[in-house]
Image: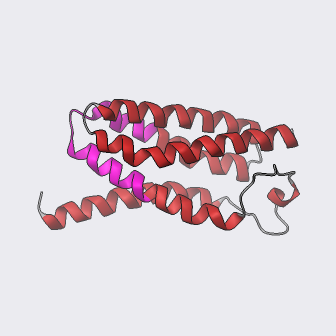
Amino acid sequence: MTGVARIAAIVGCILLCQAAGAIGALTTQTGSSSWYQTLEKPSFNPPGWVFGPVWTLLYALMGVALFVLIRQWPGSRVAVILFGVQLLLNAAWTPVFFGAHQIGAALLIIIAMWLAIAATMASAWFVAPAVTWLLLPYLLWVSFATVLNGAFWRLNA
């Protein structure tokens, strides 16, 4: 793969992952008159401005991880499939939580997403250990987000 093709592939993988976030952004309304503002929030709920930069960085790391996995094809086939599963779950979470206002269903999705991320990391370890390290911040953030989602469910069910 030439340098230009490699850069194009990396950018494409990053854009694919960023698109998962963009899907969620289309259904997110957190302004002063939004449903979200009516929810009781846990004391450890971060300020809203934190989420954009964190997710932008995480999606970029995910895109690089996907590029590394694709470069290891066909040995990384299982990891790529699991990566796709977690990305679909990621794209589904925000519309379910913010769009459909289904906090409990969103909790089930984020738990499944956490499991899919962990499975992706485990399967990638054998073909491309760097992927596991690239996805570790994502797993840690989703761990926090799972606890946060659970707290929203407990406080607002």
Judge whether 78 appears above or below 52 on screen: above
* Quadrant housing residue 5: bottom left
Q: Please give the name of the residue rendered at 82% of the width and 63% of the height, measured from the top-left corner.
A: 34
Quick check: 152 above or below 61? above
Q: Is residue 37 left or right of residue 90?
A: right
Question: In which quadrant of the rendered image does the N terminus lie?
Answer: bottom left
Q: Could you say where residue 108 lies in the image, as x and y percent from the top left?
A: 66, 33
Q: Quadrant of residue 109?
A: top right
- Residue 80 colored in magenta in the image: yes
Which quadrant is home to the C terminus? top right
Q: Main secondary structure of the magenta part?
A: helix
Q: Residue at x 44, y 55 (%)?
A: 17
Image check: 98 left or right of 119?
Answer: right
Magenta stretch?
60-85
Answer whether residue 88 is visible to the viewer in this image: yes
Q: Position of residue 117 (x, y in %)?
A: 47, 37
Question: Residue 18, image x and y in percent?
Answer: 46, 59
- Place of residue 115 in the rendered image (x, y in percent of width and height, measured from the top left): 52, 31
Q: Specify whether 31 is left or right of 77.
A: right
